[in-house]
Structures are given as structure tokens and as C-alpha cells.
Image (spheres, grey):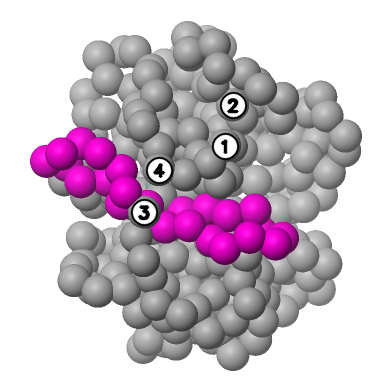
């Protein structure tokens, strides 16, 4: 479901099966195989992984039933969660403040969580009216502690300026699944269901365009320019910087690709699986050197 790492020699991929205790985290050390990490027996399926530091900092993973896992000293353990809703994303500029988002995307109120670095505890955050009938917040990502964006169902977006959250719904009621950004490129969000959508931030408003392809799930912006998008049917696209123009890349799979991550001037990784088929799911990890 997600892949992230502080360096090409330390990567983590998370996912699993939807039944209780079905969580899975794989670790890659830059050579050889991806190996499973030891998790608490009741860990549910996980949806996102992220660490705010480089090197030996802590790493968090979130997922089903409000699960929040943290890796410290090579050991994964569960942190107390204030929700049982699905968590789809987690991000933080540093360990002093982390954010997690979720909701079932169908019929429930979305959830926004904050982790306080001093108390080392999570709490639910009251956010402003989203301006749309939103049932899930899917990803959170920032370029600074006072420049954080959240995207979600039906074009819902939130921005945090270091003090308050504000809502900035898109003009079109499109599902936005993931986002990324860089100082040079700005913000890029992707989503869509039957058709892929790309949205770019212009000021405080999102400008979106629809593509004649299936839905998109993941985006990674290389700080040096290249932008990689992934989605349904094994779609891998290169987005031209500063535009909505995309070029298809060769893909070795027809499976759903859910997330993409890479290193500037280095390898890229995409992960996903048979997510549109009944479980048990078959996972896939793609590498591009």
C-alpha cells in the first residue's frame, strides 16, 4: 500500500490482508530481498509509512481500525490511537508534531489526528467545515511545519499554517488520493476513480484536470524535477514539470499501483497489488534504478 525510506539502503513497504492481524511490513537494506519485520500479533492491515527524520529516527505506519505503529530501536510497537477509523496517511516535519488522516470514504465523518511530541500522544483534531460531503481524508503531506496540506474525498482539502487549519475545496468534486510537492515544482495532487485526475495548487486554490486514463493513486515529486504518478492497471506516468502533460512509462504489471517513492537522482519504487480483487491480496513491489 505504501513505500518509504530514509535512504536507498533502508526502505519499508507496508500492507497486508484485511483480516484481523493481517498487517505486514517489509524492510529492504539496499541489497537482497525485502524481509518481513516482526509486528505485534494483532496488527491490522497497514496503509501508509513515513519517518520525519533521516538515519536512525523513528518511523510510523498507520492503517485499519485506527492502528498507529512506531518503529524505535529496530522494534515495532503500537501507539494508543484515539480512533478506530481507517487511517490512510501520516506525515510530520519532525517528531515534534505529526499528523494522520482517515475515514472510510463511504459513509462516515473523516478523521484528523495530531501527535504531540512532548506528551508523545495522539488526539483527534477538530477541523473546519470542508465545504463538501466528504467521508474520507486520504493523505497529508507538507513542505514545512507551517505548510501542510490534506486531500480527500470529493475534492476536500485542508491547509495548516502552523496555527490553524482552513478548508479549500476544489471547484470540481473529485476524489484526491495523494499529494506531494517541492519548492521548485509546488504542490501536485492526484486521484480520480473512473478517470485519473491531476491537481496543481495555484495560490490557495487547486486547479484540476481530467485525463483519459484510469484513476491515479500515488505521486512522488523528485526535488530535481521529475514527477512520477501511479495508478490503476499498473499505470506509471511521468508528469512534465509545471504542466499537466504526462508521458506513459513502461509497466511490467496490470495490478493496481497504490504509491510511489524515490530518491533524487536514484532509484524509484512503486507498490500495490490485486486490490480490486477479493482477498487474499497479492502484493507487488516495482523498482526502477
Identify the mark nearer the N-term, 1 or 4: 1
Q: Which mark is residue 65?
A: 1
Identify the mark nearer the N-term, 3 or 4: 4
Residue 261: image x %, image y %? 49, 44
Q: CA distance from mark 3 to mark 2?
A: 20 Å
Callout 3 touching callout 1 (CB < 8 Å): no
Q: Is residue 176 left or right of residue 165?
A: right
Classify the position of the N terminus by image quarter. top right
Callout 1 touching callout 2 (CB < 8 Å): yes
Question: Which span is picked out in magenta?
Answer: 101-123
Front-most of 40 and 147?
40
Q: Residue at x 63, y 77 (%)?
A: 133
Label 2: few (<14), some (14–19) or many (≥20) C-alpha neighbours in 10 Å: many
Residue linked to disc 2 = 44
Residue linked to disc 4 = 82
Most distant residue in the right direction: 278
Amino acid at each position: 500500500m505504501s513505500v518509504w525510506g530514509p535512504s536507498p539502503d533502508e526502505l519499508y513497504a507496508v500492507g497486508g490482508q484485511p483480516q484481523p492481524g493481517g498487517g505486514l511490513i517489509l524492510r529492504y537494506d539496499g541489497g537482497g530481498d525485502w524481509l518481513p519485520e516482526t509486528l505485534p500479533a494483532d496488527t491490522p492491515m497497514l496503509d501508509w509509512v513515513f519517518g520525519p527524520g533521516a538515519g536512525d529516527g523513528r518511523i510510523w505506519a498507520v492503517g485499519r481500525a485506527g492502528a498507529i505503529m512506531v518503529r524505535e530501536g529496530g522494534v515495532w510497537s503500537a501507539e494508543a490511537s484515539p480512533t478506530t477509523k481507517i487511517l490512510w496517511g501520516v506525515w510530520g516535519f519532525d517528531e515534534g508534531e505529526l499528523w494522520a488522516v482517515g475515514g472510510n470514504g463511504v459513509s462516515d465523518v473523516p478523521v484528523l489526528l495530531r501527535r504531540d511530541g512532548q506528551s508523545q500522544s495522539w488526539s483527534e483534531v477538530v477541523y473546519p467545515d470542508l465545504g463538501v460531503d466528504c467521508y474520507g481524508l486520504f493523505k497529508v503531506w507538507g513542505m514545512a511545519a507551517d505548510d501542510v496540506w490534506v486531500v480527500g474525498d470529493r475534492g476536500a482539502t485542508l491547509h495548516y499554517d502552523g496555527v490553524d487549519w482552513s478548508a479549500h475545496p476544489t471547484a470540481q468534486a473529485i476524489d484526491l488520493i495523494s499529494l506531494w510537492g517541492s519548492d521548485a515544482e509546488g504542490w501536485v495532487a492526484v486521484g480520480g476513480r473512473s478517470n485519473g485526475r491531476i491537481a496543481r495548487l495555484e495560490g490557495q486554490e487547486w486547479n484540476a484536470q481530467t485525463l483519459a486514463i484510469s484513476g491515479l493513486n500515488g505521486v512522488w515529486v523528485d526535488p530535481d524535477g521529475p514527477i512520477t504518478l501511479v495508478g490503476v492497471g499498473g499505470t506509471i506516468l511521468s508528469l512534465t514539470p509545471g504542466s499537466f502533460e504526462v508521458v506513459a512509462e513502461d509497466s511490467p504489471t496490470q495490478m493496481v499501483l497504490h504509491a510511489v517513492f524515490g530518491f533524487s537522482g536514484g532509484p524509484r519504487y512503486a507498490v500495490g497489488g490485486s486490490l480490486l480483487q477479493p482477498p487474499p491480496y497479492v502484493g507487488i513491489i516495482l523498482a526502477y534504478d
